[in-house]
Amino acid sequence: MHATDLLSGTPLIDGHNDLPWALRTLGEPEPDLARGEPRLHTDLPRLRAGKVGGQFWSVYVPCSFTGDTAVRAVVEQVHRLADTYPADLRVVTTADEVEAAFADGWIASLLGAEGGHSIGGSLQVLRALRRSGVRYLTLTHNLNTEWADAATDEPVHGGLSAFGRTVVAEMNRIGMIVDLSHVAATTMRAALATTTAPVLFTHSSARAVTDHPRNVPDDVLESLPDNGGVCMVTFVPRFVSRAVADWDARLADAMAAAGQDHRDLRAREAFAAAWDGPPPPGATLDDVVAHLEHVREVAGIDHIGIGGDYDGVAELPAGLEDVSAYPRLFDALLDRGWSAADCGKLAGRNALRVLRAVDEVAD
């Protein structure tokens, strides 16, 4: 079997794509995604070529946005893509709707809010986002919130504060998926101890393969079968390649010495372009395969997915340069002996199971 045949019958559901925010940063006039857009990793022709059946679009705002400003920036992004391209994108909120959209030839469009700061400390805003169709909330982005510790910030809450546990419980009640990408390992463990529904890591890889704080430790991966959750392996080079991670750590030290914040994506890209340090190494498709195989070994085939993080990073692994490349990855897995059934679980069946289970807990 070839990947294109597999993905024609099984919806590929990617956990995280930052296209909505990338479009905001490009400014006006907004590019026509139906015609193709070389400045981006994502457009409609390449989504079709990549056999993408469902996409969680990230409605992200930077951590510099707080309070009402953050809330407004999230709300402004909800459904904007699907409203602009109704011939290709169908807004969905349930697993059944994903499967129906896929069967009808649409790309199922799901939404995830990236960063707990986007609820402005308000459970009512959380509920409003859920009513508007947002299916997951990433508890933090690169900085701590007032109630949860981030992977790339100094811990202050021991994982989750009392209000943080309340947020997780409310997410279970209303059917909002708890996304544990970006959070500290202590937050992962606290959230897994609190939640009564499966979680997602929408764009994280394995820390045992690449020792980066954004990746998931083995003890957390081992807990996913009990929870029912899924780790959606990402393609971000510094999360999947040890060489890139080591280079990035040197870049972070240089930025800190210059008084700049490595967690700021734009600042990092600008500093790296002018830095007189060594040239960056590259990641490869094989690096991503190594993470997929490790997560499968530790967590099990029922607890793995894909979250590429396209249009959220400047560089991507060789062979996975844009959203048209998913079949290449699945062909590599099939060549390595992955069964069609296992590839189907990775592609989207596991994510659909989480959607259904979270709705069952809420019901």
Image (cartoon, rainbow, N blue to C red):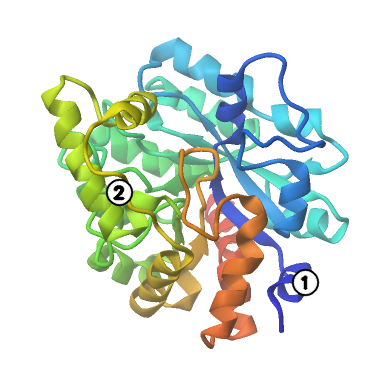
> How many other residues sit within 10 Å of disc 1, few (<14), some (14-19) or many (≥20)?
few
Q: Nearer the viewer, residue 192 or 348?
A: 348
Q: How many marks?
A: 2
The residue shown at (38%, 36%) is 167
Q: Is residue 232 above or below residue 214?
A: below
The residue shown at (84%, 61%) is 103
Question: Where on the picture, by quarter, is residue 148?
Answer: top left
Q: Which residue is mark 1?
A: 9
As drawn, the residue found furthest toward the top would be 68
Q: Nearer the viewer, residue 359 or 178?
A: 178
Question: Where on the picture, by quarter, is residue 189?
Answer: bottom left
Residue 275 appears at what percent x and percent y? 26, 30
Secondary element at tag 1 = helix
Amino acid on which disc 1 is placed: Gly
Relative placement, left or right, of 86 versus 198 is right
> How many other residues sit within 10 Å of disc 2, few (<14), some (14-19) or many (≥20)?
many
The residue shown at (81%, 36%) is 35
Q: CA distance from mark 2 to mark 1?
A: 32 Å
Q: Which residue is mark 2?
A: 214
Please indicate, yes or no, whether residue 154 appears anywhere in the rendered image: no
Relative placement, left or right, of 282 versus 92 is left
Residue 108 appears at what percent x and percent y? 73, 49
Residue 236 appears at what percent x and percent y? 42, 50
Secondary element at tag 2 = loop
Residue 52 appears at what percent x and percent y? 70, 56
The residue shown at (44%, 51%) is 203
Relative placement, left or right, of 186 versus 2 is left
Amino acid on which disc 2 is placed: Arg
